[in-house]
Structures are given as C-alpha cells and as structure tokens.
C-alpha cells in the first residue's frame, strides 16, 4: 500500500492551518528610532500603537526618566537591562493628538530634552 502521499498532504495542510492561527490580524508597526541628542525641540510623528525607541548613546538606558504632558496621547517607558538584554527608553503613541515630552537624566550636568510627539490614528 502506498499511503505516504496522502499522509504528507495531511501533515502539510495541518501545518498550514496551525501557522495561519498564529498570524496576527493587526499589522505590526515598526518603531521609530531617534538618538536622544537629536530630539531637542523636534517633533516626532507616531501612529497609535507605534513606539519611539530612544537611543541613549554612551549613557545608561536606565538613567533617563520622562514626563508626558498629556498621558492620554502618549506614554513614556523607562529603559532597562534585563537578563543580558538592553531595552532603550521610549514613548508609545496611545491616541490621536499632540503632547510635549520632557526627558531628564539622573547624571548631573545633562540638560533636559524637550520634544513634541504627534500621534495619528
């Protein structure tokens, strides 16, 4: 008897069905990356759900704190190191609108960085 062909076909169909179940119905929005030194006075455009990834350069990622003027529009996420992985600080667009963001660094002598985030729906 030759049942290899039907078995292979069945396995292939089952695999494709399983993979399609893993697919997200929502598109993934790539983050926007900016150097912290380039943000002063700038406007960063994000979409709802999109992240601004802030590259801190030589400074520790966890040395920055952030204040968002309108937390209904955007949210600051602190940088951190976890299990050997480094996560930059960032700002996530939450809802349509515009808001100021002020980044402060705990290292003395570094001026605050103030910029605007505009979030589109």
Image (cartoon, grey):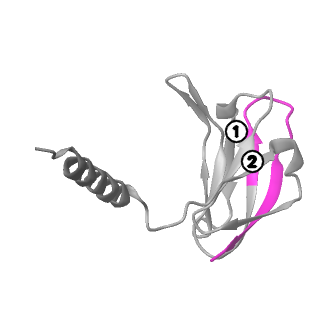
Magenta range is: 102-121
Looking at the picture, tell me which residue is in the foreground, 46 or 106: 46
**Position of residue 89 measured from the top left corner of the image (x, y, whole percent):** 65, 42
Q: Which residue is drawn at 65% across and 54% down?
A: 91
Q: How many labels does the image show?
A: 2
Could you classify mark 1 by the number of other residues whose Cα lies within 10 Å: few (under 14), some (14-19), or many (20 or more)? many
N-terminal of the pair, mark 2 or mark 1, is 1
* Main secondary-structure element of the magenta-colored stretch: strand
In the rendered image of this protein, does residue 61 appear above or below residue 45?
above
- The location of residue 90, given as percent across then percent down, is 66, 48
How packed mark 2 is, by other alpha carbons closer than 10 Å (few <14, some 14-19, many 20 or more), is some
What secondary structure is marked by label 1? strand
User: With respect to residue 91, does 89 lie above or below?
Assistant: above
List the residue tagged with mark 2.
103
Does residue 114 show up magenta in the picture?
Answer: yes
Direction from residue 2 to residue 20 in the image, left or right: right
**At 24% across and 49% down in the image, what residue appears?**
5
Magenta residue check for 105: yes
Where is residue 109? Give x, y as percent: 86, 32
Residue at horizontal 76 percent and vertical 36 percent from the top: 56
Q: Gap in Å between the C-alphas at discs 2 and 1?
A: 6 Å
- Position of 116 with respect to 29 (left or right) is right
Along the viewing direction, whichever of 81 and 68 lies nearer the viewer: 81
In which quadrant will I find the N terminus? top left
Asked whether, in this view, residue 101 is left or right of residue 92, the answer is right
Secondary structure category for the residue under label 2: strand
Q: Is label 2 in contact with label 1 (beta carbons under 8 Å)?
A: yes
Q: Name the residue under label 1.
A: 64
Name above or below for residue 29 compared with residue 73.
above
Near-viewer residue (86 or 117): 86
């Amino acid at each position: 008897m030759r049942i290899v062909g039907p078995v292979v076909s069945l396995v292939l169909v089952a695999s494709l069905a399983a993979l399609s179940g893993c697919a997200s119905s929502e598109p993934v929005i790539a983050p926007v990356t900016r150097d912290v030194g380039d943000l002063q006075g700038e406007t960063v455009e994000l979409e709802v759900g999109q992240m601004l990834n802030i590259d801190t350069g030589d400074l520790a990622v966890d040395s920055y704190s952030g204040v968002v003027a309108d937390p209904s529009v955007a949210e600051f996420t602190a940088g951190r190191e976890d299990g050997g992985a480094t996560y930059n600080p960032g700002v996530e667009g939450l809802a349509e609108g515009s808001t100021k963001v002020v980044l402060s660094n705990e290292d003395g002598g570094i001026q605050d960085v103030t910029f605007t985030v505009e979030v589109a729906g």
